[in-house]
Amino acid sequence: MKMPAVLKSDIGFLRALFLSALVIRLVYALPLPLDRLSSDAYDWINTAWAVTQGQGFGDSIRAPGYIFLLTGIFSVFGKSIAAVRVIQAVMGALTCVLIYKTGKKIFTETTGRIAGVLTVLYPYLIAYTGDLMSETLLTFMLACTMYRIVKAGETASWKNLAIAGVLMGLTGLTKTVTLPFFMLACAWLWWQTGKFRSGFLAGAIALLTITPWALRNYYHYGGYSIMPINAPHALGFSLYTACCDEALLYEARGEGVRKPGDKPVASFMPADAYNLKLPPVERKKYYMEKAKSWIKTNPDKFLWVVYRRLVHFWRLYPMIAYKWEKIAAMATSGLYLPLAAIGFFLSLAAFKKTSLLLALFATYTLSHIFFTTTLRYRIPIDPFLIIFAAYSLDRAYGICRNRLRIKLPGPPHAFNAI
């Protein structure tokens, strides 16, 4: 079976990749009822609509990136859920293109093509196209940023480093937990290029990108909060709700099948986490003291909870899910994660390049397991796991072709050139 001529060229493949990803996401997302949204989605929507109406960002605990995206869409199309889903479908399709280009740069064209196709078909990424949550935007921003960091590592021009730095800052504004990774990314640029100025320039521009929002927080909270990007009570809230007896119960639930009447996550949080009537700064102090007290009193429980979160974060399928969701997950991430592990070991010779991805996995994991976490939080980094999985398939393809001496279509395998 011959590959269609249009797919043999790079531009032809990119167009096919983008259009197929876009069509799949639109076909899934647009027919969804307008109220088919996660409970958290309404908080994002309400905050963005308040900004659109000139009421300001207020004391929302959300990072501003996705709020401003929704605000921009609402300003043009009104409070349209369908418009957001279309924009997210476009971002999802562009993510697939960027994963192809990143996989091609780090490994080979074949690896990039396989990674791009697997990302097109990845159920989690398709599903979040239809929800108004920050996962689709964060996945897209990470894909943009990683590609530009890799490109800057190859050619450390002022332009490439500046673009990488701006994207780091914008991604940090989308989700604060990415900031530790970007510190390592700057070190990676120094190591990759052999020039300290590469990492320093990218990091400085990232910091400048974040600074306007940091200054906004500083003045909004009376000179109290500059970092993190979220409101001062956001960190305290997250730590308190993750370090309490209710969080222990939540992590100990065990596996189950989702059904009507299941308790929402909020039911596993302390009652005073939501009902506390204090200013943001005082709220943070209260939350932090409660969390520290629980950790100090229950160090064994705290370590067990952290361990359970690590397991949940890297599960092959959601702990609490419908049966069909578990089957779909095992048919995708259940295969991709083991293949990614194999790809990591097969690519040790290219560690200087792949260490950027490994730094992302490590920092992103550590940034989550000390707080309440679910498999959903891992989704934005899954495309980079898919790159490793694609490399495993690339190697297997090359070995089979060489041993069986069968002339198969597609670009030549070049992993030995790494």
Image (cartoon, grey):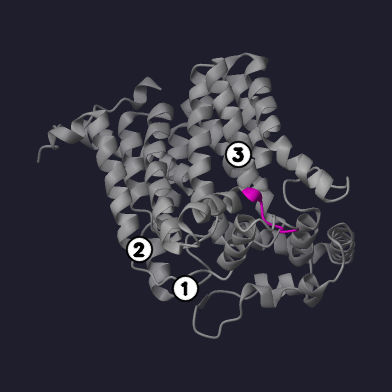
* The C terminus lies in quadrant: top left
- From the viewer's side, name the closer residue of 393 and 177: 177
Q: Is residue 165 above or below residue 136?
A: above
Horizontal and vertical percent position of residue 271: 78, 77
Residue found 43% across the figure and 46% down from its top: 91
Q: Which residue is mark 1?
A: 35
Q: Amino acid at mark 1?
A: Asp
Residue at the spot of label 3 = 170
Q: Which mark, by number, is residue 221? A: none
Q: Is residue 85 left or right of residue 159?
A: left
Instruction: Give 328 or 304, whichever is nearer the viewer.
Output: 328
Disc 2 marks a residue whose amino acid type is Leu
Q: Which mark is residue 30?
A: 2
Q: Quadrant of residue 214?
A: top right
Mark 1 and mark 2: span between their CA atoms?
12 Å
Indicate the position of residue 8 as horizontal and vertical percent values: 19, 31
Earlier sequence position, callout 1 versus callout 3? 1
Question: In the image, which residues are magenta?
Answer: 59-64
